[in-house]
Every structure is written in C-alpha cells, then in structure tokens.
Image (spheres, rainbow, N blue to C red):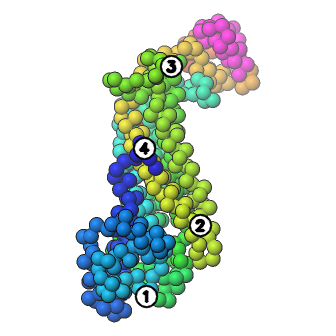
C-alpha cells in the first residue's frame, strides 16, 4: 500500500488509530455484557466508557509493546492508564487476544466492503451510461485479435456491465460471509466467558456471532473474501485490456481522455499512451497476489497459531486499498473515454465486406449446396480479399458457382449491417433488466 494508489477513505480504515478504537469498543461492549450477567461490577463497566472520547496514543502503545512484545497487552495497559488500574481490572475478562484481533479485522473488512460496493455502483453507472450512448455504434468484433463479425460498442460496455454486476453480487456475499465476530475465549469453548457476551458485542458492531470458532475465526471465510477481490481485479483487467487494444495506433477506436498539459512521453512529444489502463492491469496483479496467501492461511495448527497474522496485516489493507483505487480509476476512465465511431466503421470496412462471410456460407447451404462445398466457395473468394485486397461482394458476384446458387439480390442482401444488430435491444433488456 503506497500513497500513489490509495484513497483516504479506505486508508483510514487501516490506520492504527482506527484499529485501537475498534479494540476499545470490543472491550467496552464486552464489559457491559459481563456487567449485565453480574460477572463484573456495573461501575467498572461504566468506568471503561470514560475512554470513549480518548484519542489513543499510538506511540505510547508502541512503546509499551516494545517491552511486552504483545500488542493487545500493550493496548490494555494503555487503556488502564486512562481508565485507572482498579477500574480497568475486569477489562478483557475471560477473553483471548484473537477475540479482539479477529473481530476487529472482520469489522475493518466489512467497512472496506461497504466502500468497495459504492465503488462498484459508480463503475456500473458509468458502464450503463456508455452502453446506452453507443448501443447502436457498430464496430467489428474480434476473435483471436482478428476481424470476426460486426457487433456494437454498446454491447461491449453491456457485457462489462453484466460482468461487474456479477462481481457486485459476489462482493455482497463475501461481505456477508466475513461479517462475523468471536468472543469465545481460549480455544473457543466459552469456558471463561458466556456466549451471550459474544452475541452482545457482535450486535453492537453489526456482526453475526461466529458459528464455531477455535481460538480464531475460521480462515476459509477470509480466503473466499480475498478470492472475490481477486476476481473483481481480473474483471478490471479485462476491461482495461480491451481499452488498451482499442487505443493502439492502428486501431484507435477509443482512447483514454488526454487532458490539457498532459505529456505522453519524455522522448516523443506525439505520444498519447493508455497509461491509466496499463496501470490498472498492474494493480489487478497486486490484488490477485493476495489470494494465494489468503488460501494458505486456512490451514492452521490445532485451535490456533499465528502464521496467518503477519500475512493479513499486509494483504488486508493492500488488497482493499488497491482495489478501491482501481475501481475508481476505471470508473473515471469509462466516464471520460473518447470513442471514435467513424474509425470503428472504417476498421470494419478495411477488408471490403469480408466480415460477412458466414452469412454467405449459410445462404449457400440453405440454397442446397453442401456445407463443405459452401465453405470452399466462400473461402476461395475470401482469400482474394486477404491476399489481393479485392472486394468480397464483387468477387462473389463474379463467381459462377456462387451465382448458380444465389441471385445478385440475395448476395447483396447478405451485406446488410442491420442483420447483425437486430437483437441488440433483446440483449440490452436481459443485461439491464433491473
């Protein structure tokens, strides 16, 4: 996580001050629940809340941890400095460090999810707007990077919208799966703390009690969460790659907005490079990089070890901060993408009707010619376009074997662009049904 690729709203979730504030809330709510059960005096629970407006001193906690070599104990010691040693003596009653650490991590991941969902809503809105704007803007579809058949720019945006809509649903599910807390004590048996304390704390923090924890919340939940972020990152790259291809000089069907004063190259003043989408391709790699470590964190020794801890301290902020930045950058790219319909049409017509070959093939088969012979007839005329720059329609009209099966009007009709866009509205109705 570096400032260059970070937005403050998401970064704030992972600041030490935020973490310690959540730690305090967990401990204070747990004290309330313990007091309600009569386990600790009510006045002690109330005394803990005296620190609710305290700005915990991160440097002081670090100073204590340098001696204790234990972050939670360092925090509890600092909390007692504010509350008073006697009043704070029931804090953390029956709890273990993972109760605080794991519950806090999940609170942070839930908050991060809420920001990411907002990000996706912005991106979905941008894709939908551009899809309708260019619903009927014809461009060539490509397979293997080679001209295939006509499609529309609107359909390109629509398929990205559908993909991101699926990703939003995945993220909502991942948020729900990660929104659990555990206040179950050592090895998760509730031996020294009543399960109602967990229920009280989780409700206060907007979480669900973990179904069964050991001394940690099961990491399969986290693995699924980070896997979801990885899938979203891959979809970001999918959109970015398409834009990068469209911006190639030989293609130039669209390009990133080039602002006044922007420079494309330190050496070549003419350059206008797809730097934002190239950057997004790189950021997607960083997010995906967190998926395998998250999956490796699932297998822990017995009821607990801390092999996952150092990993999550890195990947949780890195993945969420980077993905937040990437989603907003992509939304900005889509909102401001410059599109060239005339170039799209020129590119499609570069090989003089060649992209209509399938229509002619089907027409020949429907006229009684075998599929194998139909393919040979169409291909031999198509190769003249590739190799000699001929006009596909003219070659077909001059081919006596083709004319024996198809009239001039029947051949000409096969070059109608509208044939390829007749179901665009149907597809849009499916994609944008909501």
Residue 121 vs 18, above or below: the answer is above
Between marks 2 and 3, how big is the CA–CA gap?
49 Å
Q: Quadrant of residue 40?
A: bottom left
Residue contact between numbered discs 4 and 3, judged by CB atoms under 8 Å: no
Instruction: Decide whether the magenta segment is chiefly helix, strand or loop.
Output: helix
The secondary element bearing badge 4 is classed as helix
Q: Judge the density around disc 2: few (<14), some (14-19), many (≥20) Cα neighbours within 10 Å.
A: few
Residue at x-position 24% and y-position 70%: 53
| Residue on which the image places disc 2 | 307
Residue 359 vs 394, above or below: the answer is below
Would residue 18 be found to the left or right of residue 97 on screen? Answer: left
Start and end of the magenta stretch? 375-401
| Residue 165, image x, y percentages | 44, 48
Residue 32 vs 299, above or below: the answer is below
Residue contact between numbered discs 2 and 4, judged by CB atoms under 8 Å: no
| Residue on which the image places disc 1 | 194
Q: Judge the density around disc 3: few (<14), some (14-19), many (≥20) Cα neighbours within 10 Å.
A: few
List the single residue furthest toward the bottom: 38
């Amino acid at each position: 996580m570096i400032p260059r690729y970070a937005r403050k709203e998401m970064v704030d979730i992972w600041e030490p001050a935020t973490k310690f504030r959540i730690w305090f809330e967990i401990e204070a709510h747990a004290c309330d629940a313990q007091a309600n059960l009569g386990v600790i005096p009510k006045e002690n629970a109330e005394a803990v809340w005296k620190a609710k407006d305290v700005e915990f001193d991160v440097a002081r906690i670090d100073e204590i941890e340098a001696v204790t070599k234990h972050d939670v104990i360092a925090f509890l010691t600092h909390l007692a400095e504010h509350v008073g040693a006697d009043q704070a003596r029931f804090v953390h009653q029956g709890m273990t460090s993972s109760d605080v650490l794991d519950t806090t991590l999940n609170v942070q991941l839930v908050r991060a999810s809420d920001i990411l969902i907002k990000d996706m809503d912005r991106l979905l809105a941008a894709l939908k707007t551009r899809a309708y704007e260019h619903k009927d803007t014809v461009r060539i579809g490509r397979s293997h990077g080679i001209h295939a058949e006509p499609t529309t720019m609107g359909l390109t945006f629509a398929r990205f919208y559908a993909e991101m809509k699926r990703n939003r649903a995945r993220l909502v599910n991942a948020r729900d799966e990660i929104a659990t807390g555990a206040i179950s004590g050592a090895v998760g048996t509730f031996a020294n703390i009543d399960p109602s304390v967990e229920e009280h704390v989780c409700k206060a923090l907007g979480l669900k009690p973990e179904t069964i924890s050991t001394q940690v919340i099961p990491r399969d939940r986290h693995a699924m969460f980070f896997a979801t972020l990885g899938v979203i990152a891959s979809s970001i790259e999918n959109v970015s790659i398409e834009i990068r291809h469209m911006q190639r000089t030989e293609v130039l069907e669209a390009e990133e907005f080039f602002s006044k004063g922007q420079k494309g190259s330190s050496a070549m003043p003419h350059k206008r490079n797809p730097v934002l989408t190239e950057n997004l391709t790189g950021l997607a790699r960083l997010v995906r990089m967190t998926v395998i470590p998250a999956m490796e964190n699932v297998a822990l020794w017995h009821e607990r070890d801390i092999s996952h801890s150092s990993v999550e301290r890195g990947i949780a902020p890195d993945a969420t901060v980077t993905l937040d930045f990437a989603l907003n950058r992509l939304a900005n790219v889509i909102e401001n993408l410059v599109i060239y319909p005339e170039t799209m049409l020129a590119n499609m017509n570069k090989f003089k009707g060649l992209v209509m070959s399938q229509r002619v093939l089907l027409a020949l088969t429907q006229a009684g010619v075998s599929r194998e012979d139909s393919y040979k007839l169409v291909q031999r005329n198509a190769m003249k376009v590739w190799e000699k720059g001929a006009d596909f329609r003219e070659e077909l009209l001059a081919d006596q074997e083709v004319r024996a099966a198809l009239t001039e009007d029947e051949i000409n009709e096969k070059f109608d662009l509208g044939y390829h866009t007749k179901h665009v509205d149907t597809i849009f109705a499916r994609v944008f049904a909501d």
